[in-house]
Image (cartoon, rainbow, N blue to C red):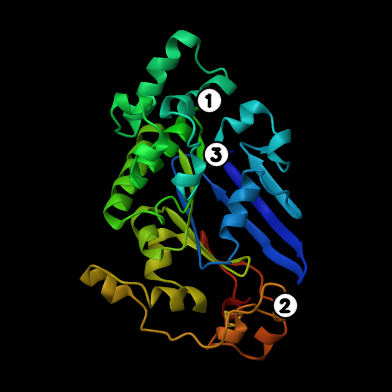
Amino acid sequence: MDELLVVEGLRKFFATSRGIVRAVQDVSFAIRPGETFGLVGESGSGKSTVAYTVMGMYRPSGGRILFRGQDITMPHARRPLALKKELQIVFQDPGSSLNPRRSIREILELPLRVHRLVDGRRLRERVEELLNIVELPPDYAEKYPRALGGGEKQMVAIARALATEPSLLVLDEPTSALDVSIQAKIINTLVRIQKERHLGYLFITHDLSLMRNIAHRVAIMYLGRIMELAPAQVFFERPLHPYTQMLLSSIPVISEEEERLKPAKIVSTGEIPSPVNLPPGCVFHPRCREAWEVCRREEPGMREVEVGHLVRCHLYGA
Ligand code: SF4
C-alpha cells in the first residue's frame, strides 16, 4: 500500500429547493506521497465539493475515502485527532481563512497547542521555524492579518497547514485570489516544500495552464464526474476526451512546443446543463461535437485506455 489517499466511487448530493443537486458522482482517484494530483474543472464541476468531502467537511452520499488504508469516510468531528493532523487544507481566500483578531503567532500556535505538538518553551521557536519555511521574517509573528498583503496571508495559511507536519495537503485554488506575480511565488514555495517533505498534494484549480507546470497527474471534472485522468504529460500531449480537447484548445501557451501540441481551436456548442436537471446519457453530449445516438441514451463508464490513462467516453468503448 503506497497510496496516501484513495477515493473510491465518491458521491455527494445536496437537497435544494430546486431539486437534488448531484454535485459529485462516481469519483475515484488515488494520491501517492510526493505527488501533486491536479483536480481541474470549470465553476460548478464539483471539484471543491470533492476537496471538502475528503476533508470531512461534507458527509459523502456514497463511496469510500481511505487514508493510508484506513477508512475515513466520516465527518471531520469524528475523525481521530492523529488523523486530522495528517490531512490539512489551504483555502482559496487567505483573507477570510485567518482570524483577524489573532496575531500571526496566535494563529500558528493554535494547531501546535490543539495537537500538543511542542511544549510551552518550544512554541516560540516552532512559530519562527514555520515562518521560515514560507520565507517570512520572524517579526511577522507579532503582526495581525490586516497588516499583511494577500500573498503573505496565503503564506501564513500554508505555514499553519504545515504546523501539524501533515502528509497530505488539500490546496483549494490557493492562488486564484492573488496577483499573477504573487501566484508564481506561492507555487514555487509549494513545489519546494513538497520536495523537502515528500508531501502529497490534492490541488484543486480551474487553471489548466497551472497544472501543466506542477501536476504529476491530472483529472478533469465536468458536472460532478471525472471525464479524463492521466499522467500530466499524457494529459497535455494526448488528450482523448472531447471536453479535455475543447478546454485545452482555448488555453494560452508560452512555448512553440506547447503550441505544436495544442489541439486545434474547438468552439463549444450548447449550454452547460443545470446540475438539478442533468441530461440522460453522457452529461457532456449537449456540448459535444462527437455525440451520436448512444451518447444521448447511455452514460459512459470510466475506461483505462492505456496504463494510468482513464477516459469516460463512448468513443473509447470496448
Ligand atoms: Fe461526446 Fe459521446 Fe464521448 Fe460524451 S460519450 S464525450 S457525448 S462522444
- The correct choice, above or below, for 228 with respect to 8 in the image is below
Q: Quadrant of ligand 1?
A: bottom right
Q: Amino acid at mark 2?
A: Asn
Q: Quadrant of the C terminus?
A: bottom right
Instruction: Find disc 1 in the rendering and name its residue.
Output: 110
Foreground pick, 282 / 98: 98
Q: In the visual, does 155 lie left or right of 108? A: left
* Point 34% across, 39% down: residue: 148
Q: In the visual, does 55 lie left or right of 170? A: right
| Label number found at residue 277 | 2
Q: Position of residue 82 (x, y in %)?
A: 62, 26
Q: Residues within 10 Å of mark 2 (few under 14, many from 20)?
A: few
Q: Position of residue 33 (x, y in %)?
A: 48, 39
Q: Position of residue 140 (x, y in %)?
A: 33, 29
- Residue lying farthest bottom? 293
Foreground pick, 20 / 289: 20
Distance from disc 1 to disc 2, alpha carbons, whole Å, reads 44 Å
Do the residues under discs 1 and 2 have CB atoms within 8 angstroms?
no
